[in-house]
Amino acid sequence: MTKRAAEEHIAPESHIVPISLYVGIWATLMVCTGLTVYAASVDLGIFNIVVALVIATLKGTLVVLFFMHLRYSTKLTMITVIAAIFFLLILFSLSMTDYLTRAWSTSIH
Amino acid sequence: MATSDMDIQVAEHALQHHFADMEQQQETSTFGMWMFLLTEIMFFGGLFCAYLVYRASYYQAFVEGSQKMNIWLGATNTAVLICSSLTMALGVRAAQTGRRKLMVVLLLITILFGLGFLGIKAIEYHEHWENHEFPGPNFHFQTIDKTAPVDPQHTEIYFSLYWAMTGLHALHMVIGVGLVAWIIIIGLGGAFTPAYFTPVEVVGLYWHFVDLVWIYLFPLLYLISKKHGGG
């Protein structure tokens, strides 16, 4: 490859995220951690787990979008991540439709 | 971005012949890493699914098991991992902008956070071990709520999942620390430039993924019930 060709091909379209954004994400994650510990000390009944999972998913989304640069990635990468979530939900939902409904059949007899 | 002669040399050296250009090469590597992380998600997913099934079946036993967790050590470790993710992200950024020394310093801090996490985890593991909260012949569990006692065997399932999930996570941390150390060593030798820093980016993805797993492990294992351990 000639020097000129290398120069043309040199800089991949890499998005440089401002430091302030990284620090902002970090601060949000820290606040959310405090929030999830606090929320666990309040009795919300069935909603305790819902709140815990919503906060965890919010934190996870921030990590994936910004720390892992998904927001600036190719469509192919985004599809990969969506596929991961999709198959994970298949694993959970199909397993649970089995386990949660097993008692139904025994109660008939 | 100004490209120095050295950058071009590294780029020529780093571009493998089967890729059209650096951009395609970098995208391919990142995609490959995400495919690997997809398999990792399914790998951890199996354990999360087992957790879901047994938690649904033996909820009260899981509540009592989780009350043996030290929430403050767990929360501290969550904070430590989030901080390590910040220094990792800033380290990748330093590689991206060609600041080699800054990258090395930030990645060293990341390693320190990682080792800090493992140290705190070791303290917790030691406590659980001393309290016979390790599944097996020496497992011992005194039910907390005497009016509605739980089956110790069901609590043992909680602890089996606790050890398996946090243990697999800790193994990933150890591997992560090793990978970051490797990046520091080859980075010191001048392997990376703004034109070529894919290994830093890819190891960063792995590190953040391990952080992501813990983000879910912490509330699921430590924060099941409103009654905080010891409180």
Image (cartoon, helix red, strand yellow):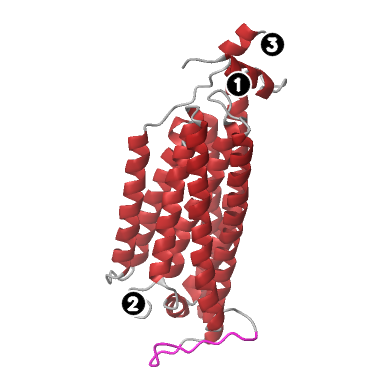
Callout 3 and callout 1 share a chain: no
Q: Residue at left 60%, top 35%?
A: B188
Query: What is the x, y in percent for residue B191?
Result: 62, 30
* Mark identifier at residue B227: 2
In the image, is residue B141 part of the stretch drawn in magenta?
Answer: yes
Q: Quadrant of the N terminus of chain A?
A: top right
Name which residue type carries label 2: Lys
Tell me if residue B19 comes above or below residue B126 in the rendering: above
- Magenta segment: B137-149
Judge the density around disc 2: few (<14), some (14-19), many (≥20) Cα neighbours within 10 Å: some
Snapshot quadrant of residue B149: bottom left
User: Residue pushed farthest right?
Assistant: B17
Name which residue type carries label 1: Met
Tell me if residue A62 comes above or below residue B172 in the rendering: above
Which structural element holds mark 1?
helix
* Mark identifier at residue A1: 3
The answer to whether residue B223 shows anywhere in this view is: no
Q: Residue at left 37%, top 64%?
A: A49
Q: Main secondary structure of the magenta part?
A: loop
Q: What separation in Å lies between label 3 and label 2 (alpha carbons)?
A: 66 Å
Q: Residue at left 56%, top 36%?
A: B200
Tell me if residue B15 comes above or below residue A30 in the rendering: above
Which structural element holds mark 2?
loop
Q: Nearer the viewer, mark 3 or mark 1?
A: 3
User: Residue pushed farthest bottom?
Assistant: B147
Q: Nearer the viewer, mark 3 or mark 2?
A: 3
